[in-house]
Image (spheres, rainbow, N blue to C red):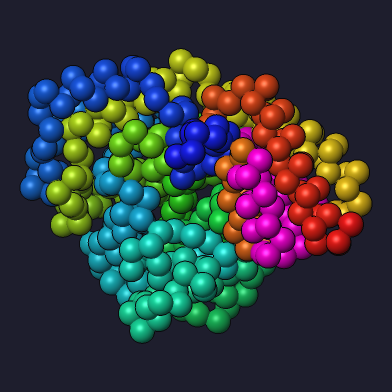
């Protein structure tokens, strides 16, 4: 990246944590231009579907290893959440259980900024501007603690003792909580949560807007944790910044109940299933495979963790480092401190993000070792300079 004044900036955020192939790709550009000279508008909301959308759905099924999944397409992760809510409520209505409207999500979670997605989001600061408009269907559980194998599952069991399970439709889970500080679930805890939901007739929705298609160092975090699910949401890794696109993948046993209402569900938009976006996403998936991006994300995450732990250990403070693939975070003492590191990092030539007290990094999945070394070096300098400024030394 280059600023208006000509300074080169290393993009440690991959755009909005979505430019997983970096910026600029000739194969994607060629596909975009080719499709732009042909069919560009076939809205699935009208009951139609393009060859590009059909081909993309088949490609996704191959990549995630779920050959009988139904894939619906939207333009953003927020819309994918909204579509998932529509699926959940329609599913239970079709089965004669319309009371199952309550939805469980975790504190600190982020599921989007449209109203339904915002209502699910467990970050209270996201609700400040429109509190009177937020629906009240959410039931809350605590955030993951990777060191506690029962934190959320134990809370879920207590919740189910206090509420009629016939009122609960689904649980929405981020296997790795991005905005909370790249916090991964404890493997045993998330497995227990899914098992409890299965026993209590609660649908499991995995929100992998961030982690889907490679960022966690696996094709999906669901695969990494070995999770069974009813719906899977993906967005950032599907378009990789080249086009706005997202998908809600619906397991066959759910889709079969919905019948002819899929894919439209009376919940689509003008750009749902857009042929140009679908064509671009196909090439994006091909490029992710060709560049071995998933494997590289796993390796580079390990490199980051080792380097960061080594260099930060000499600073004199504890800075917890979290790395699951290229979901990277360094936890500091305060949000003010984290913002100070972010500003200094940008001045030094590194773009990162500060959320709460966490420093967040999500570089492209194709990042090379030399760039990772540079990223850690710049981050370390930013932390050291912030440390000196805060102590007056």
Residue drawn at 61 percent across, 45 percent down: 346
Residue 144 location (% of width, % of height): 65, 59
Residue 202 visible in the current orientation: no
Residue drawn at 73 percent across, 46 percent down: 382
Residues shaded magenta: 319-348
Of residues 313 and 183, the one nearer the viewer is 313
Quarter in which the C terminus is drawn:
bottom right
Dividing the picture into quadrants, the one containing residue 40 is top left
Q: How many marks?
A: 0
Above or below, comparing residue 93 to residue 67 in the picture: below
Question: Going by the picture, which residue comes out furthest to the front?
Answer: 5
Residue 269 location (% of width, % of height): 18, 52
Queried whether the magenta region covers residue 329, the answer comes back as: yes
Residue 120 location (% of width, % of height): 43, 67
Residue drawn at 55 percent across, 81 percent down: 162
Position of residue 5 in the picture relative to residue 191 (left or right): left
Residue 356 location (% of width, % of height): 63, 63
Above or below, comparing residue 290 to residue 98 in the picture: above
Queried whether the magenta region covers residue 111, the answer comes back as: no
Residue drawn at 18 percent across, 45 percent down: 271
Of residues 5 and 97, the one nearer the viewer is 5
Residue 113 visible in the current orientation: yes
Question: Going by the picture, which residue comes out furthest to the bottom?
Answer: 132
Position of residue 199 in the picture relative to residue 388 (left or right): left
Position of residue 264 in the picture relative to residue 133 (left or right): left
Of residues 345 and 266, the one nearer the viewer is 345
């Amino acid at each position: 990246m280059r600023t208006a004044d000509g300074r080169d900036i290393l993009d440690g955020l991959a755009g909005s944590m979505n430019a997983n192939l970096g910026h600029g790709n000739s194969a994607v550009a060629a596909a975009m231009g080719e499709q732009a000279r042909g069919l560009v508008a076939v809205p699935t909301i009208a009951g139609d579907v393009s060859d590009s959308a059909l081909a993309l759905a088949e490609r996704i099924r191959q990549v995630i290893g779920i050959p009988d999944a139904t894939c619906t397409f939207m333009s953003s992760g927020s819309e994918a959440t909204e579509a998932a809510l529509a699926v959940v409520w329609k599913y239970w209505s079709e089965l004669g259980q319309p009371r199952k409207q309550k939805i469980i999500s975790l504190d600190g979670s982020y599921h989007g900024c449209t109203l339904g997605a915002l209502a699910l989001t467990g970050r209270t600061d996201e609700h400040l501007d429109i509190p009177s408009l937020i629906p009240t269907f959410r039931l809350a559980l605590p955030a993951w603690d990777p060191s506690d194998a029962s934190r959320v599952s134990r809370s879920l069991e207590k919740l189910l003792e206090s509420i009629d399970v016939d009122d609960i439709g689904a649980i929405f889970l981020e296997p790795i909580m991005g905005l909370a500080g790249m916090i991964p679930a404890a493997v045993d805890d998330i497995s227990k949560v899914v098992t409890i939901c299965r026993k209590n007739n609660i649908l499991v929705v995995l929100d992998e807007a961030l982690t889907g298609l490679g960022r966690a160092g696996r094709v999906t975090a669901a695969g990494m944790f070995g999770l069974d699910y009813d719906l899977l949401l993906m967005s950032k890794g599907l378009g990789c910044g080249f086009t706005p696109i997202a998908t809600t993948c619906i397991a066959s046993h759910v889709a079969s109940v919905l019948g002819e209402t899929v894919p439209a569900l009376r919940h689509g938009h003008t750009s749902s299933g857009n042929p140009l976006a679908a064509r671009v996403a196909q090439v994006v998936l091909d490029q992710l495979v060709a560049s071995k991006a998933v494997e590289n994300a796993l390796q580079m995450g390990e490199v980051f963790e080792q380097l960061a732990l080594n260099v930060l250990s000499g600073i004199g403070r504890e800075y917890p480092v979290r790395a699951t693939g290229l979901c990277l975070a360094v936890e500091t003492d305060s949000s003010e401190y984290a913002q100070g590191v972010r500003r200094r990092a940008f001045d030094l030539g590194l773009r990162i993000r500060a959320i709460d007290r966490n420093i967040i990094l999500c570089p492209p999945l194709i990042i090379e070792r030399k760039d990772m070394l540079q990223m850690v070096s710049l981050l370390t300098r930013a932390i050291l300079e912030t440390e000196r400024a805060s102590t007056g030394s």
